[in-house]
Amino acid sequence: MTSSLRVASLPILAAGVLVSQTAFAQNSWFVEDVPDFDQRRSASTGIVGLPADGGMYCVPTSTLNWFAYLANRGTPQPGTLAGPRDWQSQDNYNRVGNTLATLGTLMLTHPQDGTSGAGQNAGAHLYNLAFCGNDFIFADLWALGKKGQKHAPSPEKFLAYHNLGGYIQTSYGRYSGSPLTRDGGHALTAIGVWDLTSGAYPIFQFRDPWTNNDSFFTQSTFRVSLAAMTSVSSFFRASSTSSAKFLNLWRLDVTEVTGNYLDSMFVIMPALGIFGLGLESGEIQVVRPFRPTGNPMPEVQSFDKPATTGPILDIAPAWDLLSYYYVTAQGSPAKPNLYRVDALTGQSVAALDNPFAPVRLSLGREDDVYLIEGPNVTRYDLDTTPGVKLAQYNPPLPAAAIAYNDLNDRVLILTAPPTGPGSRRVLGLPATLAGAPTDRALPVSLSGEVHICPDMADPDAFWVSGRGGLLGLDALAYRIELDRGTLVVSDTVTYPRSTITGLCVTAENGLILTVNDTLVELEKDIRGNWVNKVGSRWAGRRAEGRFSLARSRTNFDPATMVGPGFHNILDPFEYPSHPDCYADCDGDGDLNIFDFLCFQNKFAVRDLAADCDLDGRFTIFDFLCFQNRFSRGCE
């Protein structure tokens, strides 16, 4: 047998009749060939180890499983993984160990406390920029966020992200007491869910980086870990000093109840952009210029907006990437409105009930939308349909452009110019739109259509664009930063005698501009000059309308999700598992009588790994199922 084993398609036995796997395809999913790296690694002669033997490296390890999977599917990651490779092979053990050390450093993983939610998001972002060509974005969702229930892990949410081409890492929190209080957590790589939709518990399939292998110097056999998912509604809280939230979370059980509740997801998605085009049909286009081999999503998806609606004025993806929003002008006879597009079905629904002529939008980190309505900025809660108006701000000059800054959770407003002498204003407000804003003069003159976009590194810097120059005919983009309380220009991009109708700042602080209805991507060269990005996946695409670049976002709250409750667990719960080759029950790489004895022993103690047909029961059909698997062998 080879060292690279795969799980074959699972046969389902019901009432003694073999049922095809496709009967459950709508609710069940599984990803083959995902690595299952060990987090615990000790240094020895010729062997790379991790700090404190990797006992707190579950987050980097469960994330690296997916990066290694992607390294075999078109994202080689030179300088670290340098795939494709046989990740089960001991020949790659040190390469994986070195990459884990690098990823742990980027994630600020602590040898005794582990990795914080903020550390994972920031570290994966840096790794993506350095080794993956910025080909991915991340949705980092926490059930203990301000609107946690909507973003809590569930079988339905896992399926949605899988169907959208996402690669899912998830974590459970260990909860106890009343109300249930988090006192640590552990990270896993989600590779499948079997949901028979018959009242049985869904079976969660995952890679657990905490291996039961006795050796910390060799890679253990890749295994599929299993848990029954139990839905629990109760009060949960981050710590003994925080307020409790009533949530429905899924607990990971076996034959006994545990205290382990899934409470976060970290989803890796291929980078995407949204176009709102002036077409008769297919006006909304979702473009993914790069998809790993085997990813189910096409390069371009086209969706229709509702009939009778007006042209698209602005468009943007939701922060969790499960939907997209766009604003329409007056139609025939549809009134202007904000619409939500379901990312899976492509269906649009009105998100608000009769807003006042919206023209621009920006989305916050917690399902809030900020609309320019007439001269004002209005904040709506989109947690329900239609959304609920929360606040409105009336700026001293009419609002012309708007953006949400994730770095400081503030709303940026660029106003129209005054009718008399003076400058446009740049206003900064809290996410609630309450309280006195910062109000500073824009140090440049812009005319025509204007845009504003936050800098990706400096919370006090941003970019603006419009028309200007000596005759007012040039397309201009300026980087503006704060210098001793005054806004000053720190960088400029100019396109003579052109029109600029779009501005996006990329994750690496480059620029994507819509110039003369065509996308241009810029980066700095070694001399600090702006040049066309070599190998850009976006440059040259037509954008005769609106374009918005999706970015990595999170609802992690560093003010409340801190302390021992968010440290990683040393010696987490050990769930039942089986080797990737299910028939090789004892994991020795050979198929023989000892595998039957191993299965019989697991069945006798009601080990979840012995529920071969995944019907939630232990019956004779599990033995028949195992016999079928054994007879088919392993690939």
Image (tube, grey):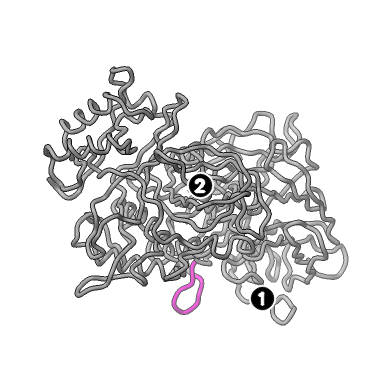
Residue plotted at (35% across, 49% down): 207
What percent of the width, then of the height, locates residue 163? 44, 38
Give the number of marks.
2
Separation of residues labelled 2 and 1 (CA atoms)? 49 Å
Image: 582 above or below 560:
above
Please tell me how crowded label 2 is: few (under 14), some (14-19), or many (20+) other residues with Cα within 10 Å: many
Residue 380 percent location from the top left of the image: 74, 46
Q: Give the SS element for disc 1.
A: strand
On the rendered image, what quadrant is the N terminus found in?
A: top left
Query: Which residue is more in the foreground, 268 or 303?
Result: 268
| Quarter-of-image position of residue 327 | top right
Task: Tell me, yes or no, whether the highlighted magenta stretch contains residue 74.
Answer: no
Of residues 191 and 336, the one nearer the viewer is 191
Which of the pair 396/318 is nearer the observer?
318
Left or right of residue 96: residue 260 = right
**Residue 363 in view in this figure:** no
Q: Amino acid at mark 1?
A: Val
Quarter where residue 584 is shown: top left
Question: Residue at position x 28%, y 62% from top?
Answer: 82
Q: Residue at x 72, y 40 (%)?
A: 387
Dot 2 or dot 1, earlier in sequence: 2
Residue ID at (45%, 61%): 124
Secondary structure under badge 2?
Answer: strand
Residue where numbered disc 1 is placed = 489
Sort mark 1 into few (<14), some (14-19) or many (20+) by Cα contacts within 10 Å: some
For residue 464, side relative to residue 514 (left or right)? right
26, above or below 119, in the image: above
The magenta segment is: 522-530
Q: Is residue 2 visible?
A: yes
Q: Disc 2 designates what residue?
A: 261
Between circles 2 and 1, the one closer to the viewer is 2
